[in-house]
Amino acid sequence: MQKAIAVLSSVLAVASILVGFQIAGPQASQDRASALSGSQFDPGNIIPDAEFYNGSGMNESQIQTFLDAQIGTCSNSSCLNVGRFSLNSHGADAMCNAVTGGSSLSAAQVIARVGAACGINPKVIIVTLQKEQTLVNGSTARGPSAGRLDRAMGYACPDSANGGCDPAYGGVGNQVYWASWQWKRYGNPAGTSNYFTWFGPGANRAVQYNPNAGCGTKTVYIQNKATAALYYYTPYTPNQAALTNLYGTGDSCSAYGNRNFWRLYNDWFGVSTADNPFGAIDAVQYGPGYVQVSGWAIDPNAKTQTVQVQWYSDGKLLGTLPANASRPDVGQQYAGAGNDHGILSTLTVGGGTHSICAVGINVGSGSNAQIGSCRTVAVSTGSPFGGMDASSTTAGKITVNGWSIDPDTAAPVVVDVYVDDVLASRSNADASRPDVARHYVNYGDRHGIATTVAATGGTHQVCAYGLDMVAPGGPTRLGCATVTVADTSPFGGMDVTTSGSTATVNGWTIDPDTAAPLQVRVAVDGVQVGTSTANSLRSDVGRVYPAAGPNHGINAVYDLTPGSHTICVTAVNVAGGSDTALGCSTVTIAASSSPSGGMDAASPAAGRVQVNGWTIDPDQQTTALRVDTYLDGAGVASGPANAARSDIARVFPAAGAAHGINQSFTARAGSHTVCSYAINVGAGKNVLLGCQAVTVR
């Protein structure tokens, strides 16, 4: 026994892989009008498990009667119906129960004992004896040679041996036992290793058409253990040529072993698939890692009962679910069955491409059967996907909309928005998008992008990126858009009117970012002389810009020395945008009774400012006027302009020389604005002599 097992292990992968003899049917003259059609051959369900593994399918008497009827008169006393054969005794193991042998047993006794011990239908053994060596029907069966009997089941007789067999397994008894033992071993029963997997049931398998690999393969969804066992034993499936000429020969790529087994079994014993469950399935992605399966299933022998359906993904059994959803269309088509035969379930399969197959569990006569065709479903996984758009309907703002889903989770995706390649926003894409939910069932509707970012006026490139939430995957660019944004800088206008030595700055300004009045800076001859709030009433402006209101007028008054002056106004920006120059105006101040003069300022030493200049009041030319000086709007010096200025005396001889300004004061380091005012006496007004920008060391 140990030697037999040791030898067996070396031939498991090559046992009986014969293409199969092309043989005549059980009765060459039978009426072909009732013969099988090749279109009935199901390569994934050659024989039901219940039929194949029925060890009591025939008793000894029935086997003998069948052999006598098929073989008839024997010409050499070696035929299976009259010959005597030996069978070794075998103890029980994982494949077979104990078998009692003998040295002079009939073939019927051998077949019955082995079939019962190993749980293999004697019909399977009889058909294999015919398929492999033509020992049951025909002229060969009526006078078999010793060689054919020696390799009766084709066990351990690989194609590569050119008809030779391992002598350790020779003889009718040995052949019947070890072939049956091997069929059970192919199922990897408890107590053995899980070695036989390449034709395992419940998955699509590639089966060659012929020992010549150049003839190609057929993808077969193998539905049961019995069919897998036949492929392990004879690893070829018939091509179309072999099926088209079911009782004859095909072409150079045809193989006949499994075709002949199916044809002989059905011709002799009438196995039918009419009692098997049937129906149809479909499968679509349903959510992150899920597939929704639908369809229907009915068992013809129990039409009102619920069919239990086994679901497979890539050959792996996921579970068994009832086909009991309401399908009125099915109930209408199959009278008396009722409506509750629909399939509507969700399977967890993970991301990637999967082959989804269903097998209906048989009730009563028949066998388990594949329901419909297997479906290939691509279940999204990896990086986020979606779309975006961007627009600007409000000055200084860009609105980004769209949606994004990470196929590996139903949770919202985090979306980054970039404006001109600079990150402007990071937010959850969790706005409601029912349209997305309708298309991507089971992800929900909270996948919308709805975010607003600030942007300066002008044209911008806006891009949105979905960040990967659950591995595998990475960030995904959802899209880019070019958006033109209206400027949010202040806008408005200005003008200047004069009256004597007085210049009045008028105008208006609004900032789109606020309804509040703005600050405006006023510069005279290039030097800022002050800041004013543009809050005067301008009803005309309020009518044009009702959202801003009317209080945006500019009204600032300055007394200037006689001569030409350029006055400029700048609106100070709020939030987005930048300061805006509202305009400049040049005015001429005529001579008047107000003082005239000029000033300049400098920093001759660290921490000090020196102011020089002159001033004269035409009403009192000999009077030394008071001069007030301001540093950054704060008074820092005040005193008479009485320093000697001979140059002034030459121009104004009646006034004399004592009209010079000479003021000095301390100041912190940095840039400052220094302004000096002549204080009027008599008629006229105080006059700004000028402003100077000074940098103090």
Image: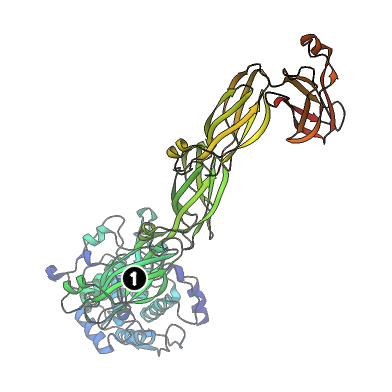
Outermost residue, front side? 682
Q: Check disc 1 and report the residue beneath it.
A: 358
Question: As rendered, which of 386 and 336 lies closer to the eye?
Answer: 386
In the image, residue 32 sits, relative to residue 217, either above or below, namely: below
Q: In the rendering, at what x and y percent does residue 145 appear?
A: 31, 73
In the image, residue 594 sits, relative to residue 206, either above or below, namely: above
Q: Is 685 left or right of 184, judged from the image as shown? A: right
Q: Quadrant of residue 60?
A: bottom left
Amino acid marked by disc 1: Ala
Question: As rendered, which of 343 and 46 lies closer to the eye?
Answer: 343
Q: Quadrant of residue 657?
A: top right
Q: Quadrant of the C terminus?
A: top right
Q: Looking at the image, can residue 162 be seen?
A: no
Q: In the rendering, at what x and y percent does residue 340 appear?
A: 25, 77
Q: In the rendering, at what x and y percent does residue 462 appear?
A: 50, 42
* Number of other residues with Cα within 10 Å of mark 1, as a class: few under 14, some 14 to 19, many 20 or more: many
User: Residue drawn 65% across and 35% down?
Assistant: 531
In the image, residue 157 sits, relative to residue 352, either above or below, namely: below
Q: Is 427 left or right of 238, judged from the image as shown? A: right
Q: What coloring was used for the rendering?
A: rainbow
Q: Looking at the image, can residue 688 be seen?
A: yes
Helix, strand or loop at mark 1: strand
